[in-house]
Structure formats: C-alpha cells, structure tokens
Image (cartoon, grey):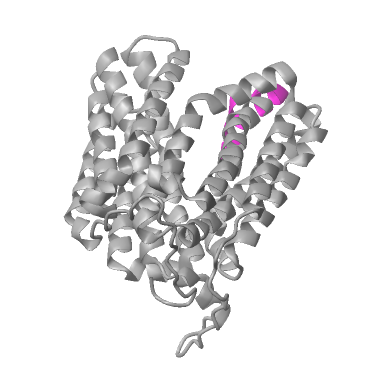
C-alpha cells in the first residue's frame, strides 16, 4: 500500500475520496435519524435507507451512461451534481417537508451507483494492473475506518447543530472531491464510443443490446461468473444478520439494544484489519480466492454467533468485519483486471446490482423470519449457506491467477490500454 500511496496521482484521488467518503459516512445514518425525529416512526426512518438502495435497479442504465464518457471529467461532474442534489435538505423544517428527504435519498442513491461505476474505471486509468489490489485495499481500509466514527459523528452533528450544518458539511465533502479530482493529470487513451452492434435474428434494439452488454460480459467471463454466482449465493442470507444481531443481543446476551453499537465498533475494527491484509491475500490466492476467504469468514462468524457468549460474539463480529473488505477488494480488483475498459462502467454497475439485490431482499426476509424462527437456527442456516458459497468460490480460485509483485518504489509508469480493446 505504501507503494501505491507514493504515486502523486493516486494520492490526489485518495484525498478527494477521503473527503467524499467522510461526507457519505456522516450522511447515511443522520438522514434516518432526521426522519425519525420528524415523524417519530422507526419504519419511516428505515425506509430512508431503502430509498438510497432502490436506485440499484437502474445499474445497467447507469453503467451504459458511464461507459460513454471519459472517466475524470465525469467523476468531477457527478461529485458536483451530488453536492447540488443535497441542497434541498437546507429547506427541511418539519414533517411536511419529509418528501424532500426521501427525494434527496433516492437521488443520492443514484449518484452513489454512478460514482462507484466511474471510480472503477478511473482507478484503472491511474494505477498499473499489479497495484490495483493495493489501491482498492487502501480505499476499503479508509472506508471501514470511517464506519467506526462517521455514522455516530453524523448523528451527533445533527443532534447538536441541526440538519443545516450537517448538509453543509456533506456538500463541502463532495465539492472538495470534485476539486481534487479536477487537478488530476490522467493519461487516458483516445476516447471512442463503441458503435452499436447490429442485432441479428432478435427483436432487441442496438441500444438495449449495449445496455445489457455489461451483464452479458459478467455472465460469459468464467472468473467473473464464478465470483458473482458464489458471492450472490452468500448475499441471499448475509442480510439476515442485520436483524439477527438484535435478537442475539437481546435474547442471547440479555443486554440492551444499544449494545449493538459496541459490536458495530468491534466489526469496524475487523474491517480495518481486513482492508490492510486484502492485497496480500489477493497476491497469494487471487481475486476469486480472496472472495472465497471473505465469504467463508462470514460463515465462521455466523456459526459462532449461534452460541451466545460475549467474548465469542466479539470474535465473531471481528471476523465478520474483516470479511467485507476482503470480498469488496477481491471483486473490484477482479472487475478492473478482467473487464475491457469500454465495458467497465456497465460491468461494475451490474456487479453492484447482482450482489446488492439479493442482500437487500435478504434483509427484508431476515426481518420477517427472526420473529417466527429461533435466531440461533437462522445463524446456523447463514453459516451453512455462506460456507457452501465460500467453498464454491475457493474451487474456482485458479480462474484468477495472483497478480505479479508490484514494481519498485518510485516507479510511476502507467500501463496504456485501448478503451476499446481487451484487458
């Protein structure tokens, strides 16, 4: 990671992302708290998070748009648009303005999908292939670190200073990201929009064929197909834990629900560790292997949580925290290394939808099941499914060979690849 952070171009991008990720981390929980205070309803507060997730359904369209423009100017523009989209929050005063919060949440969710898709291509332009795992590892480590303090800081900021100052801080973060990204000197190959392919013996239009090109590529490329099938299988039950953890604290540990905050902090510490070790795991086992390790770690954690014990529970959530960056770094690096640049926006957005869709469904299903089935049995089910998914992924680890060692410190050559050629 020190090697990639010595690169001036990546350091500049890193500074911008640090500002935007800080804004993101303080905003998400605070929006739900804001709705809870306006309405007194926990259900309406939870619906705020759903409003942010809902735009995932537009991922193929978002990816198609992203792939039609150069990465750096688009990244700058989307950050500025995101800052603008947050400004209606300054007008929120009482319950009658609730629709403004939901509107901002939906638009913010759409911008989040867009920024994620653009970022995958931008990192690939800035960083040589052998350093992609390190770059993604750095960003995941920071993201997990912000999870330790960001949501609580955002909620505290809202409680003490109100929504106006909270919105101002978030807007400043995205504007800062846009300014720093605008200073980048990205050497992008000549940009050429792909010509739409003619659709033979099919009723689909060339435009619809281009919209689905990213998903088709994910399905056709063996390593990506294996990664998404395995991770998608695990995601079908991983979301159960969002509800099960409350039952574990209440029925198992016999503690107040606020103790969940302690476990979340421990999970964040595990996330920091996972982000730090993820590049090393990828160098030894490849991207699919890192995914397998991450999903399997979650299975081990779920099995440990089926038996209520404080120290065992802390160890379990530590492992669960470490699993997230391992899976994210593995998946993002695999997409960046294996996807032609002309498709990387659609592939990244499609992968996000394939993983987040089942996880969102599992959160809802878990909330229903925890009321009728013993949480310990559900944790065992989560463990069995995720361990099965981890084993399936581990069996395909040879589909993604470990990358070559990084270049010596100080080397700044960026690999040049055509935006319309193969990786």
| Image location (x, y in percent) of residue 379 | 28, 30
Q: Quadrant of residue 47?
A: top right
Quarter of the figure that contains the C terminus? bottom left
Q: Report the number of numbered marks.
A: 0
Q: Nearer the viewer, residue 279 or 319?
A: 279
| Image location (x, y in percent) of residue 231 | 32, 50
Tell me what residue is drawn at x 28 percent, y 62 percent: 223
Q: Nearer the viewer, residue 130 or 153?
A: 130
Quarter of the figure that contains the N terminus? top left
* Residue 104 seen: yes
Q: Nearer the viewer, residue 196 or 98?
A: 196
| Image location (x, y in percent) of residue 232 | 35, 51
Q: Compared with residue 169, is residue 235 higher up or lower down, i.e. above or below?
A: below
Let me know if residue 40 is in the magenta part: yes
What range is drawn magenta here? Answer: 35-49
Tell me what residue is drawn at x 45 percent, y 38 percent: 364
Q: Compared with residue 305, is residue 56 higher up or lower down, i.e. above or below?
A: below
| Image location (x, y in percent) of residue 109 | 60, 47
Let me know if residue 373 is in the magenta part: no
Q: Nearer the viewer, residue 315 or 358?
A: 315
Q: Is residue 101 left or right of residue 351?
A: right
* Residue 309 seen: no
- Tell which residue pokes out farthest to the front in this image: 410
The secondary structure making up most of the magenta span is helix
Tell me what residue is drawn at x 65 percent, y 61 percent: 73
Q: Is residue 422 left or right of residue 111?
A: left
Q: Quadrant of residue 375?
A: top left
């Amino acid at each position: 990671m020190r090697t990639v952070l010595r690169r001036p171009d990546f350091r500049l991008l890193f500074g911008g992302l640090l500002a935007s990720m800080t804004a993101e981390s303080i905003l998400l929980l605070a929006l739900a708290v804001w709705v809870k205070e306006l309405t007194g309803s926990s259900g309406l507060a939870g619906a705020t998070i759903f409003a942010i997730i809902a735009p995932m359904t537009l991922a193929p369209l978002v990816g198609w748009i992203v792939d039609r423009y150069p990465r750096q100017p688009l990244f700058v523009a989307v950050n500025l648009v995101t800052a603008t989209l947050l400004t209606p929050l300054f007008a929120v005063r009482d319950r009658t303005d609730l629709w403004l919060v939901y509107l901002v949440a939906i638009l913010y969710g759409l911008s989040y999908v867009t920024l994620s898709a653009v970022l995958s291509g931008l990192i690939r332009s800035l960083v040589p292939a052998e350093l992609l795992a390190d770059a993604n590892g750095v960003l995941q480590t920071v993201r997990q670190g912000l999870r330790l303090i960001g949501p609580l800081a955002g909620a505290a900021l809202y409680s003490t200073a109100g929504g106006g100052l909270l919105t101002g801080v978030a807007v400043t973060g995205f504007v800062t990201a846009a300014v720093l990204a605008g200073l980048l000197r990205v050497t992008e190959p000549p940009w050429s929009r792909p010509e739409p392919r003619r659709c033979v013996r099919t009723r689909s239009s060339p435009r619809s064929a281009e919209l689905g090109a990213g998903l088709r590529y994910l399905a056709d490329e063996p390593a990506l197909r294996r990664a998404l099938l395995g991770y998608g299988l695990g995601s079908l039950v991983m979301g159960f834990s969002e509800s099960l953890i409350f039952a574990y604290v209440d029925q198992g540990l016999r503690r107040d629900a606020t103790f969940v905050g302690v476990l979340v902090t421990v999970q964040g510490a595990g996330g920091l560790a996972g982000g730090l070790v993820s590049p090393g795991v990828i160098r030894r086992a490849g991207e699919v292997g890192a995914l397998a390790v991450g999903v399997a770690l979650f299975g081990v954690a779920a099995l440990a949580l089926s038996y209520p014990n404080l120290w065992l529970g802390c160890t379990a959530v530590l492992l669960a925290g470490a699993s997230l960056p391992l899976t994210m770094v593995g998946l993002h690096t695999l997409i960046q290394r294996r996807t032609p640049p002309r498709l990387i926006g659609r592939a990244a957005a499609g992968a996000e939808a394939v993983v987040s869709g089942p996880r969102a469904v599992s959160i809802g299903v878990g909330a229903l099941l925890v009321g009728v089935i013993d949480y310990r049995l559900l944790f065992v089910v989560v463990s069995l499914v995720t361990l099965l998914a981890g084993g399936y992924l581990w069996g395909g680890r040879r589909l993604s060979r470990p990358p070559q060692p990084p270049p010596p410190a100080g080397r700044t050559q960026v690999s040049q690849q055509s935006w319309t050629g193969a990786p």
